[in-house]
Amino acid sequence: MLVQELSPCCSAFVSIDEVGTPYCKKCYEPAPLNSSEVKEYKSISESFEIRNFKSLKRGHDFPMWTADLFEDGKKVAYLTDRGDGGEVRVEMAEALPKSGLYRRLQAAADALAPVTHYDQVLDWSVDMLLGELASEAEAFKHAATYLTFIPAGGSIGGFAHLKVGRKKVRKDDLLVDGWLSKNTDITLVLPR
């Protein structure tokens, strides 16, 4: 076993197991990321969340996706984007009344700061909010396994991975700490 460095979690030496994963000798947990200088991504909505996100690479013109929309932990709708450039389809969950969901989504969209897109300042719409929540869900899904980040000046829809050649770097890889210390202008996406 190789001794790498002191672990920030419990001040014990971090070793590398047979597979190459760094772990703490004292608590046997995977070594945490040293991301003290890097910003962490925060969700754009505290009350709405997308779960069960599934993306199909082929839609009509763009990738198609489906997901469940949750409000304060309760499923309120099933979402579908067919990838044809139209709006996200919202099908209400059967157990909940239909009234008020669109109003609450619009209130959440109105609470967000306007965005600049190709020199135009745009207010958020419900469709933009749902698309951004879908991008978040996809980024959180990738962050469970790979180092996922948003480049400086980017948005969650343009999330990226650290790659060596064509291979994505796993979040517990030894390259991560060194790379994060040199690239502090990114926003790190951590899994939920």
Image (cartoon, rainbow, N blue to C red):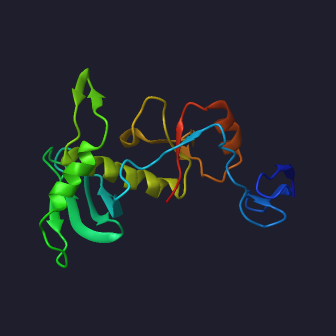
Q: Is residue 102 left or right of residue 132?
A: left
- The mark tally for this picture is 0
Q: Position of residue 154 (x, y in %)?
A: 41, 33
Q: Position of residue 95 (x, y in %)?
A: 19, 79
Relative to the observer, which residue lies in front, 139 or 168? Answer: 139
Q: Residue at x 39, y 37 (%)?
A: 155
Q: Is residue 174 left or right of residue 133?
A: right
The residue positioned farthest toward the bottom in the image shown: 95
Q: Is residue 176 left or right of residue 106?
A: right
Q: From where the camera sits, is residue 144 visible?
A: yes
Q: Position of residue 10 (x, y in %)?
A: 81, 58
Q: Quadrant of residue 137?
A: bottom left
Q: Give above or below for 133 relative to 68.
A: above
Q: Is residue 151 left or right of residue 7?
A: left
Q: Residue at x 14, y 49 (%)?
A: 87
Quadrant location of the N terminus in the rendered image: bottom right
Q: From where the camera sits, is residue 81 visible?
A: no
Q: Quadrant of residue 34?
A: top right
